[in-house]
Image: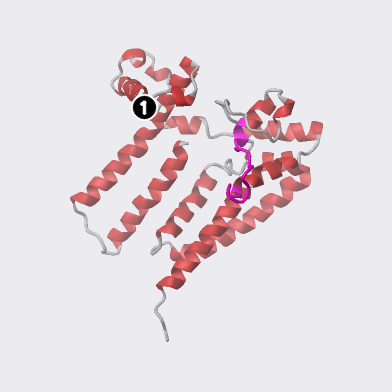
Amino acid sequence: MKENIIRNIIPYAIYLFILYKEGVISVRFPLIAKLAILSIFVLLVFSYISVFRGIVTRTQKEWSQITVAETIQEFGEYMWDEGRYSKTRTDQQTSVDYLSSRAGAITCTAWAIDYAIKKGAQPDYMYYCAVGILPRFFFPNKPPLQVGGMIFHLSMGDENALGKYREHTQSSSSIGLIGSCYFALGFLGAIIIPLFLGFFCSLYWLIIKKYITRDIVAIWAFFLLISVYLKDYEAFQDCGIVFVAWSSVYMLVIYLRSLARRPDKS
């Protein structure tokens, strides 16, 4: 997922900027080169991965069957307006706006609420999502998780898809925070869990903000929080379980790193 790649890059660029403002590094060629490379990568990664998805859809091949060389060749055609992209590029969703076109979850959320109203809440869904935070050495038989793919199959009428992994899924659907809470626990769940997550996010911010200017882990944690807001909590299709678990780990790591940097007063 391109968002996961970029999410790890932008905090590093912010970290470089903070180091510059603090006088730790100066504006020299190595710094400019790093920022230029990062910027170009961020701008092009959406187009590259979208071209890859286009090849998969057009050829009906498995993702593992599409080679890097094949994707790079078609990506070059896209960049230079050649081949299949010479006349139809305006019809291709292969630019940065590709992210925006896939950011909405209103329809999927409405489907999840309608499903729970008609067929009842599905508490097993929370168990399926919660399993994802357990390391495999604790749970050797942990099933591969593909929440979006499972929801896609369920929405297409496959009643046996709930709580199961679909290996060949090439589409996924996000039912968002409200949709997942209603889907798993009904109306009360859709009220209580978002209130708890609002409180947790506020506490999360209060804890990490004082470390942002001196700890790259805090910068990463802050950017993760911002990305959640920008996507309208769409990534919380697991009722926010994974976010709470990993954010708690980040807060612990930041705190332990701060203890390690404190001078020994003895």
- For image coordinates 63% across by 47% down, the residue present is 139
Tell whether 147 sits left or right of 209. Answer: right
Q: Position of residue 91 (x, y in %)?
A: 43, 18
In-front residue for pair 77/227: 77
User: Among all residues in the image, which is located at the extreme bottom?
Assistant: 266
Decide whether the magenta segment is chiefly helix, strand or loop: loop
The question of residue 146 being in magenta is answered with yes
Q: Quadrant of residue 145?
A: top right
Q: Position of residue 140 (x, y in %)?
A: 61, 45
Instruction: Give the color scheme: rainbow, by chain, secondary structure or one colour.
Output: secondary structure
Tell whether 201 sits left or right of 72. Answer: right
Tell whether 101 sits left or right of 155. Answer: left
Magenta extent: 133-149
Q: Amino acid at mark 1?
A: Val
Q: Which residue is mark 1?
A: 68
Tell whether 27 sits left or right of 51. Answer: left
Q: Position of residue 40 (x, y in %)?
A: 31, 38
Secondary structure of the residue carrying numbered label 1: helix
- For image coordinates 38% across by 64% down, the residue present is 214
Q: Give the vertical position of 80 relative to 244 (above or below).
A: above
Q: Is any atom of residue 107 visible in this view?
A: no
User: Among all residues in the image, which is located at the extreme left?
Assistant: 29
Specify few, some or many for label 1: CA neighbours under 10 Å numbering under 14, 14-19, or 20 or more: few
The question of residue 248 being in magenta is answered with no
Q: Quadrant of residue 176?
A: top right
Q: Give the vertical position of 138 relative to 154 (above or below).
A: below
Q: Quadrant of residue 47?
A: top left
Number of numbered discs visible in the structure rendering: 1
Q: Position of residue 5 (x, y in %)?
A: 42, 41
- Which quadrant, please, contains the C terminus? bottom left
